[in-house]
Each structure stands twice: as C-alpha cells, then as structure tokens.
Image (tube, coloured by chain):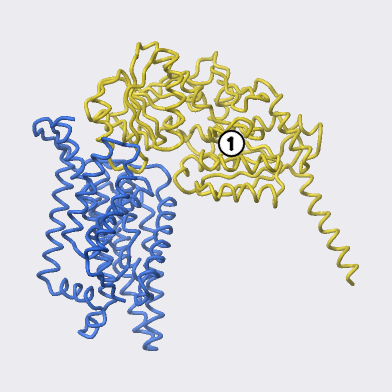
Amino acid sequence: MDLSIVGILLLDGITNGAVYALLGLATVLVFTVTRVIFIPQGEFVAYGALTLAIFQTGKVPGTVWLLLLMALLAAVMDVRLTWQHTRNVPKALKAGALTLLLPAVVAALSIWAAPRQFPLLVQALLTVGVVTAFGPLVYRVAYQSLADASSLTLLIVSVGVHFAMTGLGLLFFGAEGFRNPSFWDARFNLGPVAVTGQAVIIVGVSLALIGLLWQFFEHTLYGKALRATAVNRLGARLMGISSHAAGQSTFAMAALIGALSGLLIGPTTTVFYDSGFLIGLKGFVAAVIGGLHSYPVAAVGALFVGLVEAFGSFWASAFKEVIVFTLILPILVWRSMAGGHSEEH
Amino acid sequence: MTFTKTLITAAAALVVSGTALADLTIGVSLSLTGPASGLGIPIGNQIKLWPTSIAGEKLKVIVLDDATDPTNGVKNAKRFVTDDKVDIIMGSVATPVAIPMAAVAAEAETVQLAFSPVVLAPGKDNWTFRLPQSNSVMAHAMVGLMKKQGIKTVGFLGYTDAYGESWLKDFTAEAEKNGIKVIATERFARSDTSVTAQALKLTSANPDAMLIVASGSGAAMPHMAIVDRGYKGKIYQTHAAASRDLMRVGGKAVEGAYVVSGPAVIAEQLPDSHPSKKVAVEFVSQYEKAYGAGSRNQFAGHGYDAMLVMEKAVPMALKKAKPGTKEFRAALRDAFESMSRTVVAHGVLNWTKDDHWGFTNETGVMLKVVNGDWKVE
C-alpha cells in the first residue's frame, strides 16, 4: 500500500461519502420534523437514477404513471377529509384539485417530453421533478393520518412503504440494472490519482446542497418554521404552523435530495431497482452517528462511512458490509452513554 | 339428509381426486420478484410457451413466486407436495432458495428439477436433478482457453455469495490441474456502488487474466472498474454474465471480454458439429418469436430444457404408473436416471443414479465480445 493507493481510496471514499451525506441529512431532516425514520429514502435514489435511464431510452418511465395514481389517491383522501370537516362540496373538490395539480402538470410534461429525446440535462431536470413530486404524496398517503402516532408505528409504516416502493420499482424498471451516461466526461490527473468529472460533480453538488440547506434553515422564515415543528410540534401548531404542510414539504425535500443522489451515482455504478435500500441504509448509519438530530455530525459521519467502506473493501472485501454496519454498534453504545438521553413523545 | 350430504361429499371428493389423477401436475417455484427476478422472469415467460400436454396427459402447471426468499421457497415446495400433490417440483432459479427446497422434495419423494446449480451433500440429492451446467463443467471450458492463451496467473473478483464461492472452489481446482494459479481473491456485492478498492488491489497483483464472477448487468460494473484502473490483461466472465445486459451496461469497456456460456444463447453461431445446435436453434426461434428479437437468455433455456427432459421421461414413467401416485413419482426419477444421453438446448445431459448434474464436458462454449456482439472463440 503506497501513497497513490491511499489517494485513490480516499477519493473513492469521499465520493461515496458525499452521497451518503446527502441521504444522511435527508434522514435527519425527515426525522426531526415528522419523527418518521424514513427507510425508503434510498428508494428515491433508485427511482431517480432509473427514471433518468428510462427517459434516455425515449420511453415514459413507469414512475410517471405511479405518480398520477398516487396523486389521484391523495386527492380522494383530501376531498374526503375536507368534506368531513366542512360538509362543503366545492371546498372539498378544491382541496382535491390542489393536491392533483402539481403532479398532473409534472406527469403531463414528462409524457410530452419523453419521446422527444431532449438533452441529458433537461431529462435530469424532469427526473428531479417527477421524483420530488412523490415526496409529499408519500407523506399524504402513508403518514399524514398517523402524524401523532408513536415513532415505532411510524417506523413500521416506513418498512411497509419501503417494500411497496421496491416492489413497484421492480414492476416499472425490471430486474436488470442501468447505468446512466456521465454528465461530465473530463478527467484530471492529480499526481497518480485520476479524478473524474463525475466525482467533482458529486462532491460539488453535495457541498452546494448542504450549504443551501443550512441557508434555508438558518435564514428563511419557512426554514425556521420547519425547525420550530422539529423542536415542538404542538407549540409550532399553536403559533400557526401547519404540521401537515411541514411534513409534506419535508418529504418533498427528502425526495428531492434522493432524486439528486440518484442522478449523481447513476453514471458511476449500475443501479438496480433495489439498489437504493443499501445506499439509504448507509445514509441512515451516518444519520445515527449524528444522533438523528445533528446535521454536521451526520455529514462527517457519512464521510467516515464512505472512507471505512473504501478501505474495508481494500483490506477485506468479503467483510466490507459487515465492517460498515458493525460500526453502528460502538457508536450507539457511545451515544447512549454520553448523551443526556431525551426522547420526546 | 346427512346421508345425502355424505354421498355428495364423497362424490365431490371422487371427482376432485379423479381429475388430480388424470392430470400431470407440475409445481414451479420461481423468483419472480427480489434480487434473482432477472433470472426467474424469463423462465416464467418460457413456461407460458410450454405445450398443454405430454404423451396424452393433460399438463397442470402451478407457478408460485418465492421472492428469492428461501423461506418462501420451502413454503411453496410444501404446498406443492401436500395441497397440490404434484408429480414433480421445479425450481427455484436462485441457488439459496433451491437448496432448502431439495430437502422438502426428498422427504416427499418427489423429483425436483432445479433451475440453479444446487450443491448438496452426497446422498442428499437423490431426488434433485439440475438443469444448469455445474460450474466445474464451465470452468473446464474456460481453463481450456486460458491454457491455450498461455495464462499462468489469475485474479478473482466475485460475488460474496454461494455463486461466487462455488466458482472460486471449482475454478481453483480446475486451474491447478492445468498449472494456473489464482494469485488474488477479492469479493463484492451486486448492490455495491463502487469496487474501486478491490480493482486496485487486483491490478497491483498484476495477474495474466482476471476472472469476474457476477450475474447479468451486475457483471459490468466490476469489469469497468478493472478496465478503469488501466488493466491490460484478459478479462473472463462466467455464464451468469452471458446476457446482452453485459454489453448494454458495459458498452466499450467490456469489448474483448471472454465469457463462458452454455450453447443455448449463441445457437446460430455454434459449429454444425456441436450436438446442441439443432435444439438450441429451435429454442431461440420459439422464444424470440414470442418475446422479440434479442430476448433470448440462458434462463429461458433452462425452462425449455425442463420440457425436453419431461417429454422424454414422462412416457417412460407412464408405462409403470399413473400420475398423481407415489409410484409414478418414483418411476419418473428412475426414468431421469436411465434415459441416458439427452441433447438439450444447453448441451448434452447424461443423468445417472450417481450423477444428478449430468452435463458432459462438451457443453461449455467460450465467447468473446467483439463489436458489442458475441463471437464464438
């Protein structure tokens, strides 16, 4: 093992770690605002990468139809709920139409654009649109009516959502994997280490997104409202912050982060319909390192997971996953010994 | 009143068992979902093309999904033998699922035709017959070409599962016989996002050739990682990678790869002297007529071969007993063991009492990827 090998492994670890960091942040975000341990986070990654892959072939991805279907379901739920509360038919229909509007526009745009084979970047944007639109709908359909349930119930729902999304992924994308074209084919030689353009994009986008998130939560009113919900749901509601709206926008952000992560890793590896789970799980390990509440620690934890993975593969490739997931044990022990343990229910 | 009821029940029972006796029932457990669904779905497609009867016996085919989960596979197998009273169990396509199913089949004294290369302890496979080639038959063809090319050292990069493990074992044995050494061994999983570290370690050992053990589109990523590290030697792939997904995902990087394959997928290119040529061409044209040009794959071939061996064995067994009976199931096993040399799409089978693998060494064919297509080497 010489310096060039260390360099290549470091680069590999950081590139993967950057993606885990994004997913770790999304996991922390979702947990703090809604108390949902969002296991299907990784599924958005696979949906993102595979939706783009199908756009590349000039077909309409199955996710678009799923989006319409879920939007319809959510709209029906909204109509029913509003009607129960107000007994006012026009108001109820309006609520349903509002839910349906955005997904319908995104879906129509995708169906129109798919056979036209637009450049890669346009297709990537469409993909982000489609997958992001899933976020609020997943929250609306699976979690909203359970918003006050215990974390354990929400976790169980998450497991169900995970299985549903993986199964639907198999249905829409098939069992074989896809690899997307690279966004940037450049190669830079830093001594013995060749840095690919894609690696630069991955690290760059991750950093930018982390910066944006920080800006959003620290310096915007809406970000502060989300933080308030995270700190105390009841208090936030008394201040006029809708916890349902907070939940839906949180899930939209989680889906957006997932879709972006999918676009980022799509060109570097073969993505299968079920690839997302393990990637998301590593993001989750990072989030756990951050105690499910600290963004900076989660980001550092993600880099750590990425590096351990890279060096673990080098030294003992047969035990790589064992090494990564065993890591979580001492960290949990340390966290439960160190932190003043406070669980809000 | 109760008497009439009893009579009706008895009559109904007779009718039910009557139809069960008349039909030849096949229980198929396939991985239609889960990680091995890429292997299971094509077999399911092929089953839809099966004839409706064999030797005048109406076929009743029950296909259940095992979701690539051993527990489900066992559940399906138990359902087949207790509820459906099947004459033969087929499946699963995933090795880890097929292994526990073998125990159920043996206990119920029902033949299992496995679509995966199931390795069982001696004496445990009395009722299990395999349709895929054993890895050692494939390794035989591969090592033959390596020897011709003067390769002395090999680096191994394989799945961390039973498939990778059994290839390592069989390949090492076959290679050592021919003076070829495996000098580096690395593992990865299908879902890994990067195998850079493994590729790095393998290329620094600098073997004459690399062997990648992976399946379907999962075989392309490690291949690209090794090429990416500037490796100039030859790269070999196993028969699980012998599908067009390798080129679809791998593109230019997999150009020049050597892939071992059963004869089925390259039917037209086989030399006329290859025993399987005719059967393989029939399989490919039937499958592609139904599912489109280029849809051929080796797994559907196993489904095709299952019907070929049934068509040979069932008439033999029918001479001894009626379907739906214990005697018929035993007769079916004896038929498989005594039907001798049988040419199928995947090669030449010769099951005997002691050998339930059966493929002869003339089976494996070496292919090379040239201009994004297969070329027989």
Location of mark 1 (residue): B114
Q: Decide: few, some or many residues near mark 1? Use Cα within 10 Å; few <14, some 14-19, many ≥20.
A: many
> Is residue A127 among the parts visible in the rendering?
no
Q: Amino acid at mark 1?
A: Ala
Q: Colour of chain B?
A: yellow
Write down the colour of chain A: blue
Dividing the picture into quadrants, the one containing residue A129 is: bottom left
* Quarter occupied by residue A94: bottom left
In the image, residue B272 above or below residue A279: above
Q: In terms of depth relative to the viewer, which is nearer, A216 or B266?
A: A216
User: Vertical placement of A336 versus B175: above or below?
Assistant: below
In this view, A136 is above or below B68: below
Q: Residue furthest front?
A: A337
Residue A345, horizontal then vertical, whole percent = 31, 76
The structure residue drawn at horizontal position 69% and vertical position 31%, both measured from the top left corner, is B311
Image-based side of B8 in relation to B362, left or right = right
Where residue A93 sits, quadrant-wise, is bottom left
In the rendering, at what x and y percent does residue B326 appear? 77, 41
On screen, residue A34 versus residue B294, left or right, reads left
Residue at left 34%, top 30%?
Answer: B157
